[in-house]
Amino acid sequence: MLIRCARCQAVFSVQEGLAGPVQRAFRVECGRCQAVFDAHSGQLPDPPRAPAARRTPAPPPFQRPVPGALPASPPLTLERRATPEEMAEVGPLRPAIYGRVARQNPFTRGGTIAVALLLLAGAAATFLFGRPRGDPRAKADQAMEALLLDDDKSLERAAALFAEAAQLRPAQADRALALLLRGSAQQDLAERLEALSRTDPAVAAEREGLLREGARLVQEGSAAAQAAVDEAPEEVPALRAMALASALTSGSPARWLEPAMRKAPDDALLQLARAEAALAGGRAGDARERALSFFEAARTAQPRLLRARVDAAALALDLRDLAAARQGLQAVVEANPRHERATRLLSLAPP
């Protein structure tokens, strides 16, 4: 039979016939809350019930969890996608760059201007401080123009320019010629100061400097001429440089003059070398006359070659032809006021 707990109202069963057919009270203990209470055996049991079939409850429909309310925040700007026409107008997009790099970004307008300014500054620096050497032939032409002026600074500049154009074989030989002309001019002036140097210490010091520098230049020019003729033994510039070096160092200039004259009989610088070769053995008699004829041929071939005029005037001084000497030297000074040798020879000419 079924008994209900007086405390927790739990329902549990008691074996039939436990109390017998006569009603009597008996004590029971609840198996749930352990309460002890009196039950009566005459208590009628509940009518038997068929146990209800256990059903599995249908699951409730799925619902998305509703998020709780978020803190208030500023409204977000809705994203709008650009149309193809707008994208075509804007052009290709580039990644954004932030911070210090953005100020140096060459893809921004400010960065483009900065890059342009840097390029301009670099070009200006290159032009002012590191200009390329340019065409070697242009350098050689500039050097020849300086050589024609014949003053010491111009001859020095000519040698430097010929050195810059050294990749051209004629330029190497012409550099040697410029060194030899510069050295021989200083040696000639030192010889003419010998008499004054005996009584004037300042002139003696000047003469010593001219002799020392002239010897150095002639030695350097001779070495350059030898290198040029070793590299190009058949070219006129190398032959005339070697002929002049031989004339100034007691060599054999005829060995180099003869093949050069066959190739370029009207070359002005070659005529100059022939004159120096004629004077190598002395300045008297027939040698002086031949030298004067070679100087005249050089002037005819190149009227702007001042060296031919100065050397011819120096020979006129040796002959005591003062009028011709002064006329020639004055013309050189008018053509090139920086010509220190012509100016000094004028000061040495007797009144």
Image (cartoon, rainbow, N blue to C red):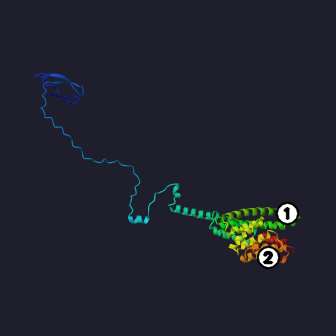
Q: Amino acid at mark 1?
A: Ala
Give the crowd class for mark 1: few <14, some 14-19, many >=20 residues within 10 Å.
Answer: some
Where residue 327 appears, as percent x and y from the top left, is 81, 77
Q: Is residue 324 above or below residue 191?
A: below
Q: Is residue 79 above or below residue 281?
A: above
- Residue that numbered label 1 is attached to: 204
Please state the horizontal and vertical placement of residue 215, each as a whole percent of the image. 78, 62
Question: Residue 234: x, y in percent?
Answer: 67, 68
Q: Earlier in the sequence, mark 1 or mark 2?
A: 1
Residue 179 or residue 76, whichever sits in front? 179
Task: Say what secondary structure mark 2 lies in.
Answer: helix
Disc 1 is placed on an element classified as helix
Quarter of the image where one finds residue 1: top left
Q: Is residue 328 left or right of residue 236?
A: right
Instruction: Give how far across and how far down residue 177 sits, in percent.
Output: 72, 67
Q: Residue at x 71, y 76 (%)?
A: 301
**Mark 2: amino acid:** Gly
Decide if residue 73 is on the left or right side of residue 206: left
Residue in view at x 83 percent, y 74 percent:
285
Gap in angstroms between the C-alphas marked 1 and 2:
27 Å
Does the residue at mark 1 contact the one at mark 2 (Cβ under 8 Å)? Answer: no
Q: Left of 134 or right of it: where is 178?
A: right
Furthest residue in direction right, as rendered: 199
One can see residue 145 in this view: no
Q: Which mark is residue 328?
A: 2
The quadrant holding residue 206 is bottom right
Judge from the rendering whether residue 49 lies leftward or rightward of residue 286; answer left or right. Answer: left
